[in-house]
Amino acid sequence: MDTRTIYITSTHTYSGKSALCIGLLRRFKSKGMKVGYMKPVSTTPTVVNDQVVDEDSRFAKAHLDLSDAPDILTPVLLTDQKVKQIISGGEEDGDAAARVKKAFETLCAGKDVVVLEGGASLREGWIVNLSPPQVSELLGVPELVVVPYITDLQLVDDLITARIRLGSSLLGAVINRVPPHKMDLVKDRVVPFVSGKGVKVFAILPRKRILYAASVQEIKDGLAGEVLCAQDHMDELVEHLMVGAMGVESALTYFRRKANKAVITGGDRPDIQIAALETSTKCLILTGNLRPNPMIIGRAEEAGVPIILTRHDTMTAVEIIETFFGKTRFQQERKIQRFEALLEETMDFDALEAAINL
């Protein structure tokens, strides 16, 4: 088989694995290569138009204009029903590995490069004997592991653990989300140390707030809110959340501290709402199910700022929204472009391509 392959897995959820898959595939495609994507096992399938699908595969298919069928892109879908059947002593999915291998062979036909997306941890998929180490062995594909920075100790332990669990088939690692004040330590201390343990580091990506951002649409869906205006701006990205509970005299100064923000306040605070609209605000979130003055809606429509009305109180709404940051899907063009720029700045592409004989 002449197709070059990379199996991208990770040690934690929301590590940047999907972003790396799309970033690499876009780069290879821009060079005129025929590319393919595959997610052998999906542990978080969803239902869209009465069909069970994997969101990452669906996005990759649409974004990269792939012609492969959904059951080739993701041959194994572990629905809740399927998992319950297995753990309740029902018949296990003995054909899962065979389906993955057949789909992989079909996918590789005519492709120059295929990128596979693995689990959100090195153990995901064991229930059907398709964990990342098992998939790598089954298909004969080398792995690239994405490890996010959380602490110094965690980073080193995760990198060494990946080497031990994946063995000689591990190409190396991409370290993601490194805070600025830790960058020198990671470059000068961590990388040489893990290199001595057999882990090649191809890139060290800094933490960038825009990559953690949530779209206005995601916030609206999470709050089960109602959009009152500017519906055509729901794909805007929110990088900060600010609560408008101060006096109007200090509101403008406060709101000017952060750009690209969502402001959450009561529907009965038109003074705060106006102050927010005079600064870089991506959406207004009004709590308590209190509708604003029509003048506010008109001004927000003119400024292109969606107003989201929610029945939640302010504290509950804040708690809900804060769970989105860093845990939203990588499906906005601005995020993709920014991540691609980071890859160009930091990734040793020559070494990676040489490692897979590309």
Image (tube, rainbow, N blue to C red):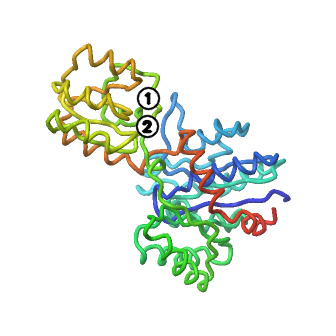
Question: How much space separates mark 2 and mark 1, taking CA atoms?
Answer: 7 Å
Q: Secondary structure at mark 1?
A: loop
Position of residue 303 in the picture relative to residue 29 (left or right):
left
CB atoms of marks 2 and 1 within 8 Å? yes
The image shows residue 307 at horizontal and vertical percentages of: 32, 25
Figure check: 95 above or below 12: above
Quarter residue 138 falls in = bottom right
The residue drawn where x is 42% and y is 42% is 214
Image-based side of 140 in relation to 19, left or right: right
Residue located farthest toward the bottom when viewing the structure as drawn: 196
Q: Quadrant of the N terminus?
A: bottom right
Q: Which residue is mark 2?
A: 215
Q: Residue at x 37, y 18 (%)?
A: 301
Q: Which element is circle 2 on? A: strand
Mark 1 residue crowding within 10 angstroms, few (<14) / some (14–19) / many (20+): many
According to the picture, the residue beneath numbered tag 1 turns out to be: 234
Query: Does residue 14 lie above or below 173 as drawn?
Result: above
Q: Indicate the quadrant where residue 305 lies.
A: top left
**N-terminal-most mark, 2 or 1:** 2
> Residue at coordinates 53% horizontally, 63% vertically from top-left?
10
Residue 285: give x, y in percent of width and height.
28, 31
User: Which quarter shows the C terminus?
Assistant: bottom right
